[in-house]
Image (cartoon, rainbow, N blue to C red):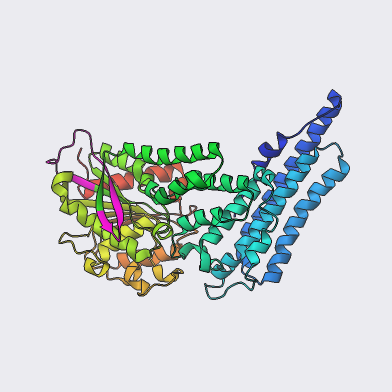
Amino acid sequence: MKQIIVSIILIFSTSVCVQSQTTEQASSTNTDEKALLSAYKALISKNEQFLEANHETIFGTNTKAFKARIDSLKNTETALVNSFQNSNKSIDPQLISGLYTETDYKHRRYQLLYPHNFHRYTGFEKKADVPSDYFENILADSFTKPDLLQSSAYERCINYYFDILSAKEYKFSHLERVPLKRLDNRYEAIVNLQANQEIKDFFLKEHFNANIWTYRVEAFDDTYKKALTDVKNEAYREEIKAAIKMGKDRRKEASEIRTYRVVEGIKLNAHIFYPENHTPSAQRPAHLFFHGGGWAIGLPEWSYGSCKKAAAAGRVAITFDYRLRNVHGTDIKASVSDALAAIAWVRENANTLGVNPNKVLVEGFSAGAHLALIAAMIEQPKDFGVLSKYSSKPNALILGSAPYDITGRDVYNVDYDPKIISPLYLEEGNLPPILAFHGEKDEMVEFSEFEKFKDKMLKSNIDFIFRTYPNAGHFYFRETTKTEAKEEKELISQFLLKNEFTTN
């Protein structure tokens, strides 16, 4: 919810036009406008801090109480702009109008967010008491004026509206666990919007520019072909072509890309990074990576940096595609199946990859850490559709911000007990050595999940090493101190050395 509108200064201050004024008058006007922008920015920050601190109280209440609270915040911002407008007649009307637009669409977005947060804060038990055309009413009159595209708040609000439309029958539910091909649905929602063509073209272009960083390039195969016809603006079409080209070109960093599985017509790839002068007979340790993204988003390229470091250290590094909810409409169990298949594939192809099948280190972050861990705990891969005679169990694990309890999450339309993919509920058995990291202020995976798993490990004979960070959240590696980061690096080095994954 932290969305302080810093960009507004750039958007609107450039539109200031001083006409027929003396140098002194121009200077005064400029000072007034700077004062307005400064005061507006400060108020936005204050309101958003209040919203962040009281998020559950505001979004978890009934519709009437929510609207009263959110309207009061909007009124403070509108009143501020009004006061400057009334006392400083020389302020550019375009600046005033722009600030009103920013305030308006920022608060319309809060209204869009309400049903999903209400569902979440009521334990996924209740839906918000809103009419069936709730979202449409909020954005009435929003799609006929291309000038609105100059507002960052408008763009952000409308983008979230498309995310809502992509959820279709689940649009009043919490959106994180929607079992639909939301990426394709989102594209179709923009195309089918009753809107000015310039507005549609803009958001279609942004659909590719933004999401190419979140999904593998194959996810856009069908919609890319459509976009070359659906988008009328030639410059935007060129931007879309450039985005797809970039998505393909970035893969050149990998030494090799091979298909490890074809399931339900979906081709899944292994992105391989070999050490320098590597040969198939080298029998090096394998270092496998599974990206995060809530089993819904993400791409192997997120792990390219880690793969390069592992390859430079002498390990064959591989990062994998796996089926994702937003792309394939699958649930977590399908992602688990792909992870099991990927690890087995590495062992099956150890001779051509040049790896030691008895030295397979698997590392993951967030959802990827869950996949790495659950692969070590599943005794019967065939129950997940993996029939390989090769083992799917890692020889060592490095986990970052792993989810340990899937039962506590909102999972739609599954025909199995989520406990079968929840590490907290599975027998630890003969788990490999584990090195785990977790932020104590994790806002996505409750720290209590980690603590329960840690206690379970410490009561067993598992080689379990961990480090937690009191002042860090889910992305702990961005928030640690220099001392903590150095310690983390040393722990990893010691873990690799102890378990014979170093080659130097």
Q: Residue furthest front?
A: 229
Task: Name the quadrant of the C terminus.
Answer: top left
Compared to residue 45, the image places residue 275 above or below, namely: above
> How many discs mark residues in the rendered view?
0
Tell whether 44 sits left or right of 292. right
Residue 243 picture location, percent across and down: 45, 40
Quadrant (top left/top right/bottom left/bottom right) for the N terminus: bottom right
In the depicted view, which residue is nearer to us: 185 or 494?
185
Q: Is 280 in the magenta?
A: yes
Residue 264 at x, y = what percent? 30, 61
Q: Is residue 30 above or below residue 157?
A: above
Q: Residue at x 59, y 68 (%)?
A: 118
| 217 lies left or right of 109 | left
Provide residue 231's location: percent of width, then percent of height: 53, 45
Residue range corresponding to the magenta coloring: 261-286
| Any part of residue 395 in sight | no
Q: Where's residue 210, x and y in %?
A: 50, 46
Q: Quadrant of residue 397?
A: bottom left
Residue at x 13% of width, y 47% of height: 351
Q: Classify residue 134 as left or right of residue 94.
A: left
Which residue appears farthest toward the left when viewing the image?
281
